[in-house]
Image (cartoon, grey):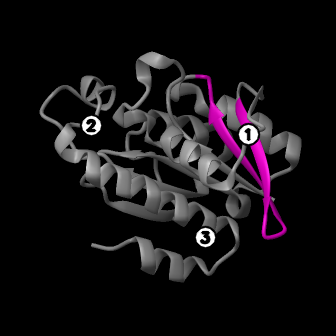
Amino acid sequence: MKLIVGLGNPGNKYEKTRHNIGFEVINQLQKELGITNEREKFQGLLSEKIVDGEKILFLKPQTFMNLSGNSIIEVVNFYKIDPKKELIVIYDDMDLPVGKLRVKEKGSSGGHNGIKSIISHLGDQFLRIKCGIGRGKDNTIDFVLGQFDKSEQKEVTLMIETATKCAIDIALDLDLGKIMQKYNKK
C-alpha cells in the first residue's frame, strides 16, 4: 500500500495557486486513473485505486497547509503506513525554478510550513516530490498564494503531468535511484 499526499489549502479562494500544486497533481492522478471515489475522511479528501495490484491512497488534507500533518498522521495510523517506504508527499518548492521537479527521500522542511507539520508528526524520512514554483519579488505569502502567470502555464502543465508520472513510478516500487536519475534533471 502507498499513500500519495498532495499539499494545498482548501477552498475556491486557493484553487490554482502556487501553494496548491500538490492538490493539482492529485487531481491529475485521479483524472488519469479514473478515480471517482473521493470522500471526506481523516480531515482530508481521500480516494483510492488498485494500480497494477498495488493499493494506492490519494489524500488532499483539508486542514490548511500549516496543519497538513494532522490529516496525514490519521491516515498513516489507521492504515499502518510506513512513512519511510509508503508515503509520498507532493508540494511546492520556491527554491526550484518553475517547472522543475526534485525527488528526495528525506530532509528538512526548507521553510515549508506544510512539511514542518508533517515532520513534527512523522519525522523527516518520507519521499517527497518537490514541484518548482520559483521565487517572486512579492512577499512570500502573497507569492505562494498567488496564481501562476500566463507565461508560466505551459511549464506548470508539463510539471503537473511529469509529477503525476513520477508519483505512479514511485508508488509502483520502481527503483528509486533510477527515478531520481530520471526526474531530478538539472
Dot 2 corresponds to which residue? 148
Return the x and y of residue 84 as percentages of the image width and height.
Answer: 69, 61
Left or right for 168, reference 155: right
Callouts 3 and 1 close, C-beta under 8 Å: no
Q: Seen from this angle, which residue lies furthest left?
A: 137
Identified by mark 2, the residue type is Phe
Dot 3 corresponds to which residue? 169
> What residue range appears in magenta?
45-63
* Mark 2–mark 1 distance (CA, rounded to whole Å): 27 Å
Left or right for 73, reference 144: right
Dot 1 corresponds to which residue? 36
Inspect the magenta stretch and tell me whether residue 137 lies in it: no
> What residue is rendered at 44% in x and 35% in y?
20
Main secondary structure along the magenta-highlighted residues:
strand
Dot 3: element: helix
Residue 112 sits in which quadrant? top left
Q: Nearer the N terminus, badge 2 or badge 1?
A: 1
Badge 2 crowding class, 10 Å Cα cut-off, few under 14, some 14 to 19, many 20 or more, is: some
Return the x and y of residue 131 as percentages of the image width and height.
Answer: 39, 52
Identified by mark 3, the residue type is Asp
In front of the other: 32 or 24: 32
* Mark 3–mark 1 distance (CA, rounded to whole Å): 21 Å
Can I make out residue 105 in this image?
no
In front of the other: 16 or 60: 16
> What residue is rendered at 51% in x and 47% in y?
25
Return the x and y of residue 91 as percentages of the image width and height.
Answer: 47, 45
> What residue is rendered at 83% in x and 41% in y?
77
